[in-house]
Image (cartoon, helix red, strand yellow):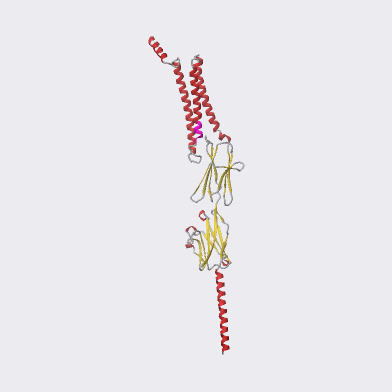
Amino acid sequence: MGTLGEGVMGATGVLAVAHCVALYLLQTVALSSERFTVTGLTRPVLAPLGGNLELSCQLSPPQDAQHMEIRWFRNRYTQPVHLYRDGKDLHGETMPKYVERTELLKDEIGEGKVTLRIFNVTIYDDGPYHCVFKNGEFYEEHITEVKVTVTSSDIQILLNPPNIKGVMLECHSGGWFPLPLMEWRDSKGEVIPETSKSHSRDENKLFNMTMALLINTSSHWNVTCYLQNRLTQQEESINIVLSGELFAWKCVWIGILVIITFVMIVSFMTFYVQQHIIHGIFSKRFSHWQKGLVVLITSILTIIGVMLILRLSQRVHVSDPHFELDTLWLEDISVVLCVMIVFIFKLVSFIYYKLEGKYPGNGGNLEDLVHLTHAQMSRR
């Protein structure tokens, strides 16, 4: 009996150990079936504006994911871009921006692979996307970066009228994303530093670019406005060839100064010849000739000084929207000042020589005026 009892107890112990081992193995298999990782693309995905975007993620090791919850979201877990649960898509819980714009491709869901398709890509779709597989309480995720991109071929160069500062070029281009590289280049492809550069965004969040270049010499006659998409490396450019006649404003102002100087010299010489050569009083009026010469030189220096001050002074920066208005004002006021100086010079010269001829003598002193008065009264 003792031997039989010991045999029964031994068999029972062996069965108990075998049962424990079986339970341990089953738990180990169950736990191993719950553990997984999520993989996908590690590099950013480029998405053209207005096109379709596909993002894939995969369970590792591969396993059936039909019973799992699959969630795609952007910044908040509770605001999914697309949600799959209990074997069906829950469109009612997605973000308003993605309603009827997403589709989950489940052809390979039995192997743990799904693909999210987004239709009609917009600028708002740019950024990170989280792909989450959840099985019970265990979950893993993979993050994919999306880069929305658009390149515009709409480029225009505006040539402003030349002024005393130079020739202003403005390059305009709209409809870019992300912010592109924009620069001026010469005929050799070398970069020309821009005068100003700015950008803005329209209602669709696309970038509109504006770049200006002030050319104050004739060194850059062949200029190119160059833009490049930093993501796709796509390039767009427009070229303009400037005529040398645009830089004739220097010759115009030099011509104006020459003409003004010439007019003043002719006016002075005319009055000088009339009063000193014809009347033969050169020797007596040498001091007046010196005074006239001083007036002439002073007037010329005044004109040149005013022109240089207005030309070199920096009242408004080139990037200021009122720069063109300031240059137009500068041109107008310069012409007005030159005309006024010439007019005043001629007027003063005319009055001076008329009075000199009406009251002859050494400067028209008081003694000459008294003798002239007595002579007129004797005649009466």
Q: Position of residue 98 (x, y in %)?
A: 50, 58
Q: Residue at x 57, y 79 (%)?
A: 17
Location of residue 239 (image quadrant):
top right
Residue farthest toward the right in the current orientation of the protein? 188
Tell me if 327 is positioned left or right of 62 in this view: left
Nearer-the-camera pick, 4 or 77: 4
Location of residue 247 (image quadrant):
top right
Tell me if 185 is positioned left or right of 281 in this view: right
Q: Position of residue 258 (x, y in %)?
A: 54, 27
Magenta segment: 307-313
Q: Position of residue 354 (x, y in %)?
A: 45, 18
From this view, report whether residue 290 is shown above or below residue 61: above
Does 122 lie within the magenta span? Answer: no
The quadrant of the picture occupied by the C terminus is: top left
Nearer-the-camera pick, 320 or 233: 320
Nearer-the-camera pick, 103 or 165: 165
From this view, report whether residue 214 is shown above or below residue 337: below
* Magenta segment, prevailing SS (helix, strand or loop): helix
The quadrant of the picture occupied by the N terminus is: bottom right
From this view, report whether residue 208 is shown above or below residue 59: above
Tell me if 367 is positioned left or right of 148 in this view: left
